[in-house]
């Protein structure tokens, strides 16, 4: 039995209401009642994203959604611009390299955000680039990109803008059509607040034209197959039915509250946490932080790994470590899924008791 709460930036702690929905008897995946659930989730998600684009659901993690977008849009040798501000920006490059795309790589230091002017320069320098692959919120650092400005630039060059919005979706403002985002990818286990298991790929008509001509190999992720089922309200393969039922519950609540209010709640508790933690003496990594998570930096001589383990053992709460070269250097607290007063105050209390003394000893 799990004896700790998730304060991680995905998967997130799931509410009792959603867990109850997740545990109910579920319909057959070809029954019209299930198609109605998929339809409700689709329409509600469109309203949240401010778009009328196609939405495909795949039973996978968010990375599966990224791969689905890539293999359906491109052919071997196509040129793409990949921007990276952390581990998940690097993942775009790894995927593009795997499927033999020609990559112009624009990396930034972990903790920074993309400089939109450099995207403009890269697209001017190489008109053969078909698309820009980027990240909305970089989960490994907590940094957020200026997607609106990037979208204006990508649109001005008449390229396709593909956005990994897995971590930032729901937590940060995103207006897909107005910001010229052609493809957006989401995951059920992040700020949406459902269990892991579903990725959503939202693709507009501009990007769909690329999908109609893609020759990269795919089968399970083939959107041409999925499109035939989508038009009837189904998915091509047996999906994570219980996750879809959970998703319907959470998405409906966001729509009823109003997505602007949901963004405001995430912004409030993220700012509150950083202000109080900063007063205590903690410092943070990203210069332009997302509302989805906060990344506390460890000073030299302090490892986050044993602190996180101690908190899990003594408090029954799990924070996230840093990733890749940042492992042991960060404590990451997710504001998604439990962006509320009780959990934020608990996080501050626990960090003050277990992490702050070790940081002060090293200073």
Image: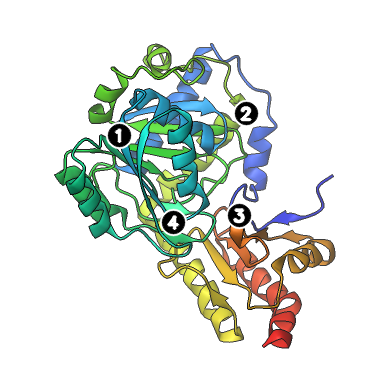
Q: Real-space Cα distance between discs 4 and 2?
A: 34 Å
Q: Residues within 10 Å of mark 2 (few under 14, many from 20)?
A: many
Q: In this view of the protein, can residue 11 be seen by the observer?
A: yes
Residue at 43% of width from left, 34% of height from top? 96
Q: Is residue 199 above or below residue 148?
A: above
Q: Real-space Cα distance between discs 2 and 1?
A: 38 Å
Lower position in the chain sequence, tag 3 or tag 4:
4
**Residue 90 or residue 137, whichever sits in front:** 90
Q: Is residue 332 above or below residue 126?
A: below
Residue 324: mark: 3
Residue 122: mark: none
| Label 2–label 1 contact, CB within 8 A | no
Lower position in the chain sequence, tag 2 or tag 1:
1
Give left or right: position of 52 versus 190. left
Q: Which residue is mark 2?
A: 242
Lower position in the chain sequence, tag 4 or tag 1:
1
Q: Which residue is mark 4?
A: 85
The image shows residue 290 at horizontal and vertical percentages of: 44, 61
Q: Nearer the viewer, mark 4 or mark 1?
A: 1
Which secondary structure lies at badge 1?
Answer: strand
Q: How is the image coloured?
A: rainbow
Q: Real-space Cα distance between discs 3 and 4?
A: 13 Å
Q: Which residue is mark 1?
A: 79
Give left or right: position of 70 versus 244. left
Q: Nearer the viewer, mark 3 or mark 2?
A: 3
The image shows residue 43 at horizontal and vertical percentages of: 37, 32
Q: In this view of the protein, can residue 258 be seen by the observer?
A: no
Give left or right: position of 88 versus 117. right
């Amino acid at each position: 039995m799990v004896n700790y709460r998730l304060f991680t930036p995905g998967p997130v702690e799931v509410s009792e209401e959603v867990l109850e929905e997740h545990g109910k008897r579920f319909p057959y995946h070809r029954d019209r009642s299930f198609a109605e659930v998929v339809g409700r989730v689709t329409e509600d998600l469109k309203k949240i994203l401010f778009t009328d684009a196609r939405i495909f659901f795949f039973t996978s993690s968010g990375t599966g959604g990224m791969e689905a977008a890539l293999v359906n849009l491109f052919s071997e040798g196509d040129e793409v611009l990949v921007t990276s501000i952390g581990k998940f920006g690097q993942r775009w490059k790894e995927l593009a390299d795997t499927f033999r795309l020609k990559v112009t790589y624009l990396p930034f230091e972990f903790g920074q955000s993309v400089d939109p002017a450099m995207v403009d320069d890269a697209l001017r320098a190489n008109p053969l680039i078909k698309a820009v692959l980027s990240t909305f919120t970089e989960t490994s650092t907590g940094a957020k990109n200026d997607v609106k400005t990037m979208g204006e630039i990508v649109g001005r060059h008449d390229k396709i803008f593909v956005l990994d919005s897995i971590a930032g979706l729901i937590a940060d403002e995103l207006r897909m059509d107005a910001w010229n985002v052609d493809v957006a990818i989401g995951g059920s286990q992040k700020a949406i607040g459902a269990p892991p298991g579903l990725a959503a790929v939202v693709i507009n008509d501009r990007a769909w034209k690329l999908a109609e001509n893609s020759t990269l190999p795919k089968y399970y992720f083939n959107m041409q197959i999925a499109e035939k089922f989508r038009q009837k309200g189904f998915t091509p393969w047996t999906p994570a039915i219980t996750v879809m039922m959970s998703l319907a519950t959470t998405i409906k609540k966001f729509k009823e509250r109003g997505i602007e209010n949901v963004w405001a709640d995430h912004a409030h508790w993220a700012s509150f946490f950083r202000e109080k933690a900063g007063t205590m003496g903690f410092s943070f990594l990203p210069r332009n932080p997302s509302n989805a998570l906060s990344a506390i930096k460890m000073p030299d001589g302090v490892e986050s790994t044993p602190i996180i383990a101690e908190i899990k053992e003594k408090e029954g709460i799990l924070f996230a470590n840093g990733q890749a070269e940042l492992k042991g250097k960060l404590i990451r607290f997710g504001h998604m899924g439990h962006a509320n007063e009780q959990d934020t105050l608990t996080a501050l209390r626990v960090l003050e008791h277990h992490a702050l003394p070790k940081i002060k000893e090293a200073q």
